[in-house]
Amino acid sequence: MSAQNLDRGQVKEFLDALEARLRERLRRDVQYKAKSVAQQVIEIQKDAAASKDKAKAHLKQPEAAFLNTWVAPAIHDTLIANTNSEKEARELLLAESYKALAGISSGPAARPLAFPFEKKMKVSDRAIYDRWTRKKEEQPFKQPYPDLAIRAPYGIVFEGKYFRSGSQDHAERQLVTAIHEALFYLGVPEVEARGRTWSYRYACLVAFDASTDDALLGAWNRLKDVRQKFWECANLKVILIGEPEIAG
C-alpha cells in the first residue's frame, strides 16, 4: 500500500468495514459460546484476576477486556484484508496494551511527548495551572495515550468505552465524555520524537452497551438528526454496539 495518506472516503470505507467485522466477531462468539458479551467479559475479568500470568493483567478491567478481546483483533483482521499482509497489519496497529498484544500490534499508542492538557473534561483551570507550577505532585504535562491507533497512511486514533449500567442522564453524559475524549487526540499537534511519530487525522469511538436497558445505545439513537455530522464536521466515526444487536 502506498505511504501516501488515504483520503476521507477511503478511511470511512475502512472504518465501515471494521464495524461490520467487529459486529460479526461479537455475534459469532455470542452464538458459539451461548453467552452474552457481558457474561463473557465478566468471565474474562475473573480469569485474569485469578491468573498468575502477567500477560492477562490487561484484561482485569471490563473496557480493556472488551477492547483487547474483540476490537483490537477486528482492527488487525481489517488491516490484513486491506494490505494483504499480516506483517504490515501488525506494524500499522499500535496499542496501549501493546506488550500483551505483541502478535497483532507493534508498539505503544502513546504520544512520544507530553502535552499541556489532558483528555478529561471538567478539570478546573486552577488545577491545571497548579500542576504546571508543580504545586501538585504530578507531572506538569500529561502524555496522551489512546487505547489504539493506526499509523499512516490511515492516521486513525481509537477511544474505547464499555458501558455497564446507569440512568438515561448518565448514559447521555457518558456519551458526550467519550466523544470528547476521542476528539481530544485530534487536537494534539503532530510530533516526531524518540523514534516514534504522532500524526492522526481521524478518530473512532468504539463503544459497547452492556446495560440491560440499552441506555447508551438509546442516547446515541436520539442523536439521529446529527449523527452523520460527527464524521462530516469532525472526522469522527462512532461505532456503538448494543447487546441485543448481536444476540444469537
Image: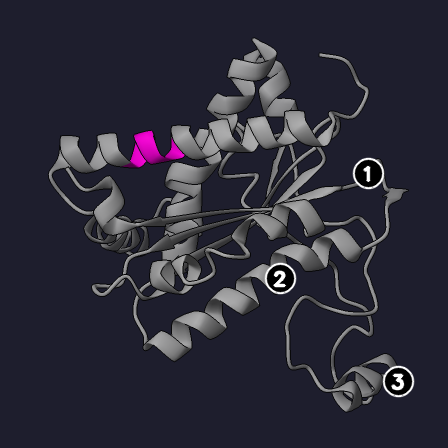
Q: Quadrant of residue 68?
A: top left
Tell me the quarter of the image containing the N terminus. top right
The residue positioned 70% from the left and 60% from the top of the image is 184
In the shown orientation, is residue 166 left or right of residue 160?
left
What's drawn in magenta, residue-wise?
22-26
Q: CA distance from mark 3 to mark 2?
A: 25 Å
The residue positioned 38% from the left and 38% from the top of the image is 70
The residue wearing badge 2 is: 181
* Residue 133's disc number: 3
Q: In x, y percent, where is residue 115? A: 82, 62
Secondary structure type for disc 3: loop
Secondary structure type for disc 2: helix
Tell me the quarter of the image containing the C terminus. top left
Q: Earlier in the sequence, mark 3 or mark 2?
A: 3
The residue wearing badge 1 is: 197
- Relative to 211, say whether 4 is above or below: above
- Relative to 2, say whether 7 is above or below: below
Q: Nearer the viewer, mark 1 or mark 2?
A: 2
Q: In x, y percent, where is residue 155? A: 72, 35
Crowding around mark 1 (Cα neighbors within 10 Å: few <14, some 14 to 19, many 20+) is some
| Marks 1 & 2, CB-CB < 8 Å contact | no
Q: Quadrant of residue 134?
A: bottom right
Q: Earlier in the sequence, mark 1 or mark 2?
A: 2
- Relative to 168, say whether 52 is above or below: above
Q: Amino acid at mark 2?
A: Glu
Q: CA distance from mark 1 to mark 3?
A: 28 Å
